[in-house]
Amino acid sequence: MATKIFNLFDFKQKVDYKIEILSGLTVALALVPEAIAFALIPGFSPLTGLYAAFVICLVTAILGGRPGMISGATGAVAAIFIGFIVKIKEVFPGIQPDEILQYVFATVILAGVFQIIFGFLRLGKFIRLVPHPVIFGFVNGLAIIIFMAQFPNFYNSESGQLLATKPFMIMLGLTLLTMLIIWGLPKLTKAVPSALVAILVVSLIVIFGDIDTLTVKDIMKGESMNGGFPPLTIPQIPLNLQSLTFILPFSFIIAGVGLIESLLTLNIVDEITDTRGSGNKESVAQGTANILSGFLSGMGGCAMIGQSLINTSSGARARLSGITAAVMLLVFIMFGSSLIEQLPMAALVGLMFMVAIGTFEWASFRTFGKMPISDVIVMILVTLITAITHNLALAVLLGVIIAALAYAWENAKRIRARKYVDEHGIKHYEIYGPLFFGSTTVFGQKFDIQNDPDIVIIDFEESRIVDMSAIEAVNKVTERYKKVGKEVHLRHLSDDCIALLNKADAIIDVNVMEDPTYKLVVDKIPKKS
C-alpha cells in the first residue's frame, strides 16, 4: 500500500522542489484572473470559478495521468453554460439564479460520471485517431484565442472604447515589460521561473509607484473573491425525468469538450516533456474532479493548455507543482484576496501573450509546400474554426472528419489490378490496394467481363476486403460473371477478409460460384509459376 502511495505522488522520480513550488505559485497567480473571468462569462459568482479551479487542479494533480499538466475552470466549459442558462430559462420560466446554480452543479456532476465511464472503458486511446494537422490547428487556434482574449483589457469596459492615451500607454508599457522579463530572464538564470519574477516586478512597480492601471479587482465588477473553504453543496433539483432529460445533453457535451481538450493538452505536454501520460487515467481523474467540483460549489472544467505550458516552461515535471498551485489558490481565496486584487492585469496579460506565442506551432508554417495539400487545408480549417467559434470539440471533430474523408479519397485512388492470361487460358486479376467504400467504383471498372475467358481468378494477395461496401462490390462482380456463364475463383483472401465475408453472408448474398458455405470457391487452379 505504501508503495502505491509513493508512486501516486511520484516520490520515486527526481523532483526539484524549488522549481515545482515556485512554478506552482506562478500558475496559481495566473489561474486567479482566468477563473474569475470564466465564471463571469455565464454570469456566475467569481467564487464559483475559483472553487472549480481549486478542486479540479488539486484532484487532477494527484490522480491525473499527466504529471505537470494543470486543470481548472476553463472558457470552453463556461461557453457551454451560456446556452445552458438561456435554455433553462425557457424550460423553467421564472427560475431564480440560485436555482440555476443547482442545475449547474448537477450537470457538472453528471458530466464527471460520463468522463469516469469513458476512462474505465479505456476509450482514451481514441485520441490517437486525431491526426497531427488537427492537433496543429487546435493548438494554433487555441493560441489565437488566448492572444485575442487579452485585448479587452486595453478597452474601457463601460464605453467599449479604446483606453485613453495615458492609461493605454501605461497598460502597453507594463505588458511589454512583463514580456521582456519572461523572455530575457532565462537567458541570465533559470534559478526561478521568469513568469513569477515578471509578475512580482511589475506588481511592485505598480503598487509602490502608485500607478493607476487596471487590476484584478477592476475585472471583478464589484464582486468579491474573499471566501472560505468550498462549501459542500448537494444539488437541490427535482429528481424527475424532466430534470434528467434537461441536464443530460449538456452533461454529455461538457464531458466531451472537457475530455477532448484534456487529452489533446496531455498529448502536447507529452511532446514537450518527451514523456508519456495515460489518457484513460486522466479521463477518470477529470471525471472525479468534476464530480467533486459540483459537490463543492464549482462550475466544472478541464485541462488548461495555457497554464500547463506556463508550468512546463518553468521546468515543472511532477505532481507537486499542480498541488502547490491548487493549495496556493485556496490560500488566496481564504486569506490573500486583498493582495491578489491588487495585481495589475498588465502583468497577467503579458504572461498570457507569452503563453500564446509559446503555444502557437510556428513550425506549422514550414509544412506549407511540404505536407499534402489536404493536411494543410485541415490544419487551416481547424485553426479558423477554433479561433472563430471557440468550440474546441466542434473544431477537432470536423478536423477529424475532413482528414478521414481526405484519407479515404486518397486511398480510393490506389486500388489497382494487374492483368494477365496464363498458359491455361485463365485470366488473372491481381488486386492491390484497399477495397473499401471509397474504392468500390474503381474496383468494378477493372473487369472486362464480356471479353474475359470462361475462367477468371481474382487474387487478393496484395489487397484487403475492408467493409460491407467492399463485400457488395465483390458480390456484384461475381454476379456479372455468373450471368454470362463464366467461372470466378477468389484467391489469397486473408483470414480477416474470410471472417468478414462469413459474418456478412447472413446479411447480404455474396453470390460467388459453387461454394455453399459463403459461396466463395476455394480454388484449385494451378498458381502462377
Image (cartoon, grey):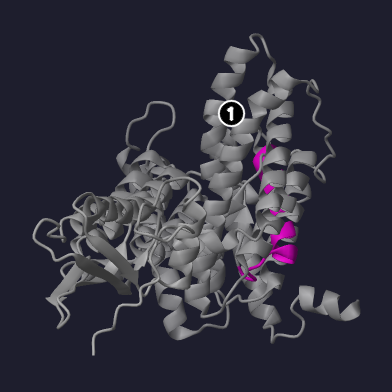
| Residue indicated by mark 1 | 43
Q: Is residue 162 left or right of residue 216?
A: left
Q: Residue at x 65, y 57 (%)?
A: 283
Is residue 23 something that shows in the picture?
Answer: yes
Question: Whole-percent x and y of residue 311?
Answer: 57, 68
Q: Is residue 351 visible?
A: no
Q: Is residue 56 magenta?
A: yes
To which quarter of the image does residue 235 belong?
Answer: top right
Image quadrant where residue 501 sits: bottom left
What's drawn in magenta, residue-wise? 47-68
Is residue 88 found left or right of 375 in the rendered image?
A: right
Q: Nearer the viewer, residue 73 or 529?
A: 529
> Does 454 appear in magenta?
no
Three-letter amino acid code at disc 1?
Answer: Gly
Q: Decide whether the magenta segment is chiefly helix, strand or loop.
A: helix
Residue closest to the eye, 296 or 512: 512
Please name the residue shown 52% across and 60% down the image. 126
Q: Nearer the viewer, residue 417 or 293?
A: 417
**Left or right relative to 470: residue 57:** right
